[in-house]
Image (cartoon, helix red, strand yellow):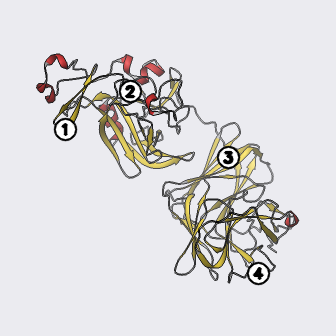
Amino acid sequence: MAALALCGCQNMELDEQVPVQKVFTATIEDNDLSTKTSLDEYGNVLWMAGDQVSIFAASTINQQYQVTDESDGQTSASLNPVSSPGFVAGGEIPNNVAFYPYSSSNTIAKNATGYVVSTALPSVQNYADASFGNGAFPMAAVTTSTTDMNLKFKNVLGGLKLQLKGAASIASISVTGNNDEPLYGAAAVTLSTNSTPAINLTDASAKTVTLDCGSGVQLNESTATPFVIALPPMTMTGGFTVVVTDTEGKEMVIKTTKSQTITRSSILRMPEVMVETIAPVEPNPTHNGYEYVDLGLSVKWATMNVGATKPEEYGDYFAWGETEPYYEDGYAQEDPQKHWKDWEDSENYAYADGFNKYYGNNEVHHWTKYTYWCSYMNYYTNAEFFTDNKAVLDSEDDVAHVNWGGDWHMPTAAEQDELLNTDNCSWTWTTMNGINGYKVQSKKIGYTDNWIFLPAAGSRKDDRLLELGSFGAYWSNSLNTDIDDDGIACMFAFSSSDVYRGDFYRGWGRSVRPVCP
């Protein structure tokens, strides 16, 4: 049914055909594009036994259907329900609507002209020989009525075809638009009976799609190997950047700055490239066994948080001045609240002794270390409040120094301000291996290729992990002595729309990014 002659044109538009049959028959209207994971020797699209589809059969209820065994390897397939969903409340719709691939999170809503299917595009696609990985290339169908069981699928995305030669074995390929276009994540697909599907991606931070080549795809030095990546239809006005990584961890960057258009149901074919200039990824320098990046500032910044093993990991959470993680050793993070740090609980926070009084309507805390005279102390005898006038952590209370040793330490407020200064560094909200955060890149002459990634690790309060993936907060080693409260420590914080200097109660669990001289 779907002839897939993958000819050598640069950008190929597809034809359409029509299918037939009873009780949900699945055919593919768009031709000349490998929408599935299997192709025959003539380039025809083949359904495979086990392929699954979401079907909204005259209802907003998402039912799971599967290609029958008898349809394996056919261009037209019969679909059977995997299981009955039982009674589920749902609204009626005047058509049958189908969406491939099946996901339990797929939902549908009626709009003025047809339907909107809410789904998600994956950030990682799996390599398939000369085709798209299973589930990476969605299709949708709308029947003419609820009694019409013939699902005529249309493609939702387009594709990018890279053609690589050489002696390397390819482990992964990533694609990023040079103007940070969204390429994956939450998506709304609009469709109707007489129109082609359109897609809108709603997560502006989802910028890099990766093709995972498993244990490696061996290139040939004389014949190009195709690598096909599904992408949403769009025009990338600044072009895109491709990073090819081989199984030895070496990288090659392929970049175009010309405007490139990905068209629905078309393949954008790039010229053949010889992968022979792949160079080893230079390791970052280390201090006492931990990597750092030189941004041209007064200190070097670590590549990862305390408690992490790679840059995008969140790491552990620490109350200010404590050197153990925010949860007690021996307890899982999901354990009851009594095992968690709490700035209001003298049994948990290291520098509170339980001496709490009330100054007006505010609770007053008595700290046993790192405390300076505050106005509320005038209302009590001097003996009731200990003050040491320490506002900067000693080395034995600096979690970066205690855990990493050497000259590693928590940054001072001034060192953090240096990083925050946009004359020194650019701050770009992005993702790294699927984790949200900021890429902080040097603007200093001679250091502009150097950057660090700060994951949006959220924060800890009692047994709660708050704002994971949308917020980040990083302690300095200093109290904020400009305010009349010795329980407040300096930090910087960020969301996707803002980066700012801040301060907060020192008993909350925050991230720590070390620095060294």
Which residue matches tag 3? 172
Q: Position of residue 278 (x, y in %)?
A: 66, 42
Q: Position of residue 329 (x, y in %)?
A: 51, 23
Which residue matches tag 1? 361
* Mark 4 / mark 1, whichever is N-terminal: 4
Q: CA distance from mark 1 to mark 2?
A: 34 Å
Helix, strand or loop status at disc 1: loop
**Is 322 rendered above or below residue 434?**
above
Q: CA distance from mark 1 to mark 3?
A: 59 Å
The one nearer the camera, 199 or 215, is: 199
**Which quadrant of the rendered structure holds the C terminus?**
top left
Task: Classify residue 1 by image quadrant.
Answer: bottom right
Q: Residue at x 78, y 75 (%)?
A: 23
Q: CA distance from mark 4 to mark 3?
A: 37 Å
Q: Position of residue 5 (x, y in %)?
A: 80, 70
Which residue matches tag 2? 410
